[in-house]
Amino acid sequence: MTAAGRNDGGPVPLREVSTPAEARAWRSERREAGERIAFVPTMGNLHRGHLSLVRLAREYAERVVVSIFVNPTQFAEDEDYGAYPRTPEDDRELLREAGVDLLFTPSAETVYPFGETAATRLHVPGLSEDLCGRFRPGHFDGVATVVCRLFCMVMPDVAVFGQKDYQQFLIIRRMTRDLSMPIGIVLAPTVREDDGLAFSSRNRYLSEAERRAAPELHGALGEIRESLLTGDRDYAALEERALARLAVAGFEPDYVGVRDARDLRAPSAQTRELVVLAAARLGRARLIDNLLVRV
């Protein structure tokens, strides 16, 4: 058996488990074989962006686990939990083709054995309240809570998260360090369509006209990046110009922000690693994106 999970007979069948006991038993077998385990948590409806996380995970470990769980605690009452796209058979086929070793599909009762309202919750202060946290109160508490629970069930050596959800990445990395979890957190580059739109499960909500307008989000961030690289440090003016551009393109912006890439604070004169972030609604879809900029 090679690190890619294949043998001379072709791809190994995708193994699927749904309980922590099964996941831990599989992990024990792999650890006894001296293999490292990389983990990619997802909510399903997989696309090329997710598959890029799987490929990167393979660079860090011999075995790759993917979870599919649509987490109810990160959705507000007025959000799209019930309508969130679920494509389990398509997802399984994509994971088979990608050579994933284990698919973990826990139920809500497994993840929250005492129910969602009685669940122990995590809050990562300082990173969770601003930007997307300001417009989706409690969202990142739900994210930190479910990721911590999945980590405890899968017990990986490393976990991979996409840059598109950069604020989420920082929160998970802080949580892992704060709780002394022996898990490396890896950031994977955003995967985009040819016109710059970041892959997202919510892109399927876009109408044809909205899909044509959607790349303006990436374009507005790119314009800020170019200004920063030429020495412009009037962050407020750059943000306002981007907000106006998005509004003209038909978006309803939540925010555009230029922040310190390390902790999402306002940049100081000494800041050299910046991140430009935005979230905006376009029809039914709420799109997010960001660009890292070294100045």
Image: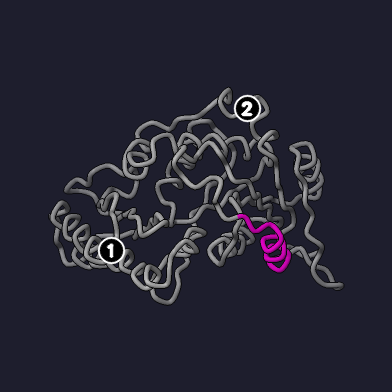
Q: Quadrant of residue 192?
A: bottom left
Q: Which residue is mark 2?
A: 115
Does 111 sit above or below residue 167? above
The local crowd at label 1, few if under 14, some if 14 to 19, many if 20 or more residues have their Cα within 10 Å, is some
Which residues lie in the magenta part? 86-99
| Residue 189 seen in the current view | no
The residue sitting at the right extreme is 9
Q: Which residue is mark 1?
A: 250
The local crowd at label 2, few if under 14, some if 14 to 19, many if 20 or more residues have their Cα within 10 Å, is few
Q: Main secondary structure of the magenta part?
A: helix
Relative placement, left or right, of 279 versus 71 is: left
- Magenta residue check for 91: yes
Q: Position of residue 27 (x, y in %)?
A: 76, 44
Q: How far apart are labels 1 and 2 at the CA level? A: 40 Å
Q: Quadrant of residue 154?
A: top right
Foreground: 285 or 63? 285
